[in-house]
Amino acid sequence: MLYVAPKWRCLLAVAAAIAAMLSAAGGAGAQETCSGAVPAPPKRGAWMSIASFGGAGDGRTLNTAAFAAAVSSIQRRRARGGALLYVPPGVWLTGPFSLTSHMTLFLARGAVIRATQDTSSWPLIDPLPSYGRGRELPGKRYISLIHGNGLQDVFITGENGTIDGQGSVWWDMWKKDSPFWNIHPVYCSNVVIRNLTILAPHDSPNTDGIDPDSSSNVCIEDCYISTGDDLIAIKSGWDEYGIAYGRPSSDITIRRITGSSPFAGFSVGSETSGGVENVLAEHLNFYSSGFGVHIKTNSGRGGFIRNITVSDVVLDNVRYGLRIAGDVGGHPDERYNHNALPIVDSLTIKNVQGQNVREAGLIKGIPNSAFSRICLSNIKLHGSAPVRPWKCAAVSGGALDVQPSPCTELTSTSGMSFCTNSL
């Protein structure tokens, strides 16, 4: 289920890299949930099927026009509360299509929305203002499979239906840095993402799972994600463009995420030029991954990363348990300001248990912008061979009950008071 609440406008992208399965309910039971912070979606006043607009779920007919016609019909009902668009069982081949406000997209059990691999069906659009250019090169970017701009009150759900991006055509065209992140709410407020399964091969490039970007009041819960890049990555634009746009990601709760990636299970960055703050990520279970937790930035990024808490993490067979670093690769252009230094402050990582871990972690700030108030608590990382020790530089904070023994930068009495008070 993906839901963007009423009274807020946002840009939503469901990209072409994915096979995502959506469920309307289940999962959390009586467990703690953040979804109640967002109003429940209203019951729609109308119901319509994609088949009524000339659609055919035979896996061969291109249904782009049918989806466009259905969305246009719902758009005309905005003043009456919109409508639910029902996708019956079958394989519904389509090019990119836009959603509209006051809309529910419902995939029945056995329904598959499948992206066409005809790349001529994918138009180019302007870059996001907080990025200022194409993802890897100057210029425009390809539109996402399911997208929308200025949306409010949008609900994507179903009975374990599937959205299949057929991303391999893009991966084969660009072996490095090909499109793109799977779920990308950008400039959004009041977003709930629950009970999703997101799958992409581990060798598929750039296929982040869920990336809230310059967004606030976001709830992500009860998802299984296995992709070729970070499973969840919080972002807010990059370099001088993100600094100028100045919209942070804030007030984000992430719970009960399980998955595997050659990169990070949970990450912040590296695109954080608008700032990231007030994040809680807890009850995370990552296996066969590059990093358990990765918080990343660099000189020239600017912005801030602060008030982040990561708790109750289980790791198995990961390279790094934890990495907090200011050395991520850059992509400067002619207006890039290398002196725009990020602020990284008040990060708490606690209650982490890991087995088959090769390196405990690295915490490396920037010489002219040291990372401050970093707290590690109750972290136990074990390996079949002795776990390589922590590496630290340009960092201050505290560490309590950490194995292997933390680096000296985190054991001085000057930084311990913050760590004690933050627990």
Image (spheres, rainbow, N blue to C red):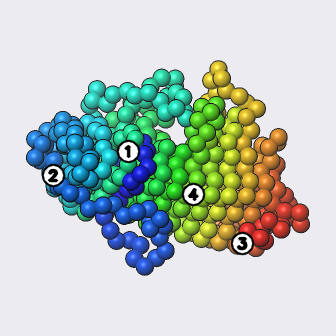
Seen as rendered, the residue at the extreme top is 334
Q: Which tag, 3 or 1, sits closer to the chain's start?
A: 1
Report the residue marked by disc 2. 48
Proximity of marks 1 and 4: CB atoms separated by less than 8 Å: no
2 or 3: mark nearer the eye? 2
Seen as rendered, the residue at the extreme right is 413
* Residue kind at label 4, given as amino acid type: Asp
Q: Quadrant of residue 415?
A: bottom right
Within 10 angstroms of label 4, few (less than 14), some, or many (20 or more) residues?
A: some
Report the residue marked by disc 1. 151
Q: Secondary structure at mark 3?
A: loop
For this view, does 270 lie left or right of residue 183? right
Proximity of marks 2 and 3: CB atoms separated by less than 8 Å: no
Q: Which tag, 1 or 4, sits closer to the chain's start?
A: 1
Quadrant where the N terminus is found in the figure = bottom left
Report the residue marked by disc 3. 423
Proximity of marks 3 and 1: CB atoms separated by less than 8 Å: no
Task: State the count of labels.
Answer: 4
* Residue 408 in view of the camera: yes
Residue 391 image point, x, y percent:
77, 54
Residue 89 image point, x, y percent:
16, 56
Q: Nearer the viewer, residue 31 or 332?
A: 31
* Residue kind at label 3, given as amino acid type: Leu
- Which residue lies at the image location 80% right of the left edge and 65% below the top edge? 418
Q: Secondary structure at mark 2?
A: strand
* Distance from the alpha carbon under mark 1 to that under mark 2: 20 Å
Q: Secondary structure at mark 1?
A: strand
- Which residue lies at the image location 65% right of the left edge and 23% below the top edge? 335
4 or 3: mark nearer the eye? 4
